[in-house]
Amino acid sequence: MFSQSTDEVASSHFSTLNWVILIVFLLGTTLIGELVKNKDKGLDAFFKGGNNLPWWAVSLSLIATKTSVATFIAVPAFIFSMQGNLTYLQMTIGFALGNVLFVYVLLKEYYEEGIFSPYDFIQKRLGVKTSQLSRTFFMIGATMSQGVRLLGTALVLSVITGQSTVLCIAIIAVFAIVWSYIGGITTVVWTDAIQFVIFIFGACFALFYAIGDIPGGFGEMMAIADDKAKLVLFDLSLDPHKTYTLWVGILGCTFFEFGSNAVDQVVTQRALCCKNLKEARKAVAFSVIGVATTWIMAFVGIGLVAYYDIYPLSDLVDKSMQLEPDRIFPYFVVNELPNGISGLIIAAMFAAGISTLDSALTALSQTSVMGVGPLVYPKLKTMHEDKVVKISKQAIIVWGLILALLAYAFSFFQDGGLLALGFKVPGYAYGTLIGIAFLALMRKGSFTGILIGAILTILIIAWMHYEGISFFWWFPVGAAVVIIVALIHSKLTSKINQKPTVV
C-alpha cells in the first residue's frame, strides 16, 4: 500500500493549525460522546441503546461504519490509475440492493425474536453448536479484517502527518476504545453520525476545490476525463476474473452487502438499536444514500485526473503515483488544499478509521461476552447485568489491544500478500454466514451438514482465490454451497432414519 520513503507527501506540509484542528476534533467528539451516552444501565442499554435511538442517527452510523478510509483513498486512486475509470460505481447497484434484501428478508425476523445479534437468531433456530460456529467465523473474520483496516488507515495517516505507523495505530485504537467504553453502542452511534458529517463535508470540499481550480470548471473536467477514457461506467464482461463488471455489481455485491447487514455484527448491531421494526427499516433503507459517498469520491478522482493534467506533477512524484496511486488523494490534500481545510479532511480520514474500529469493538465485545462467554464461564448466565456490562467494557479494551497488536504485526508483511489477503478474509466467512442465516430462516440444516458445507466452502473459495476469481463472487457461491450441502445432508439423514430396521 504505502511506503513511507517519499518525503514529498509527508509532515512538512502538515502544519500546526492542522494538528490543532485534528486534536480539537478528536477531543470534541469524545466530549460529545460522553454527553450523549445512555444514562441507563444494563445490557440492553449498553449494546442496543435501550432501543431508543432515532432512526436517522442509526442510519448515519450505518453509513459511517461501512465507510472506511479505503473509500477516501482507494476510489480516487483507482480512477486516477493508468487503467482506471468509473466501472467501480457498478458496485453501488449491489450495495443498494443488499440493503433492500436485508430489510425484507431478515430484519423483521430479528425484531420479532428480540435478539442482540444474528448469532442469537441462529441459536434459536438451529441450536447452540451452529450458533457458536457462526460466532467463530465472525470473530476470526472481524479480527483479521479490522486489524488490516486499522493498519491501512494508520499507513495513510502516517504518510500524511509524518508520524510513525505505530503512533497512528495507537491514536486510532485509543479513541475507538474510549468512545466504545464510555457509552457502548449509544456513544458509538452518535459519534459515528458526527464523523459522517465531517467525512461528507471533506469529500465535497475536495471535489469543489479541484473543480474551482480547473479553467472551464466542471465541463472542462469531464472533457479531460473523457479524453483519457475515464468515464467508462458499464462493463458487461462475463469474465469471472474481472472485479468490476455489471454482473458482479448486481449479484456479487448484493450478497456482499446483504451479508454485511445481516450477519456481520459490526453492522447488524446498529439495525437492532431502533425503537421498532418500522424505524429500523427506515434506518437501513435510508443508509442506501451512503453510495453517494462513493460517487463523490469517484468524481474526486475525476477531478484529480483533470487537475494534474492542467498542473502536471513533477517527474519524480508522477513516477511515484504511477507505482502507488493510493498516494494521490493524500498528496492533493496536503499539497494543494488550504491550510486548515486539509486538517479537517485528515480529521475525516481519522473519523473513517475510528468509526469502523469502534463499531467492531462493541460487536466483538457483545459476541465474546454474551455469546461465547456463558459456555466458557457458566456463571455469566446468572450474573447481575451491571457486572456483565463491566466485563463487556473490559472486553472492549482487550479487543482494542488485540486489533492494535494485530495491525502492528501486519505492518511487517505489508509488502507481501498478507495485507491483501486480510481485506479478503471476510470472503471466507461471509458466504458461510449468509448460508447459515438463510438456513435459520428456513429452520433447516443440522450442525454436521452445515459444518461439512462450511469446510467445503472454504476449500472452494480458496480455489477461487488461487484462480483469481473476483472476491465478490465468493459470497453468493459460499452461501449456495452451505445451503445445498446442508439440505442434502438433512435429506439423506432423514431417509436413513426412516429406513425400517431389518431384524
Image: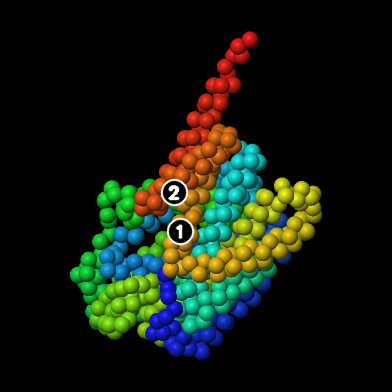
Foreground of the two, 407 or 277 = 407
Q: In which quarter of the image is residue 74?
A: bottom left
| Residue where numbered disc 1 is placed | 421
Q: How crowded is mark 2: few (under 14 residues within 10 Å), some or many (20 or more)?
A: some
Inspect the image, locate mark 1, and give the three-letter code of the amino acid beneath it. Leu
Q: Residue placed farthest to the top in the image?
A: 503
Describe residue 31's horizontal placement relative to residue 299 as left or right: right
Which residue appears at 34% of the width and 55% of the height? 243
Q: In which quarter of the image is residue 28?
A: bottom right
Q: Position of residue 134 (x, y in %)?
A: 58, 46
Inspect the image, locate mark 2, and give the three-letter code of the amino acid beneath it. Ala
Report if residue 193 is visible in the image.
no
Judged from the image, the secondary structure of the residue bearing numbered disc 2 is helix
Judged from the image, the secondary structure of the residue bearing numbered disc 1 is helix
Which residue appears at 35% of the width and 70% of the height? 77
Q: Position of residue 175 (x, y in %)?
A: 61, 72
Up/down of 251 relative to 182, above or below: above
Report if residue 370 is visible in the image.
yes
Q: Position of residue 396 (x, y in %)?
A: 66, 63
Describe residue 204's horizontal placement relative to residue 355 as left or right: left
Up/down of 237 relative to 410, above or below: above
| Quarter that holds the C terminus | top right
Q: Quadrant of residue 8?
A: bottom left
Q: Position of residue 498 (x, y in %)?
A: 58, 19
Up/down of 196 relative to 462, above or below: below
Foreground of the two, 227 or 368 = 368
Which residue appears at 28% of the width and 48% of the height? 238
Sequence-wise first label, 1 or 2? 1
| Quarter that holds the N terminus | bottom left
The tag on residue 462 is 2
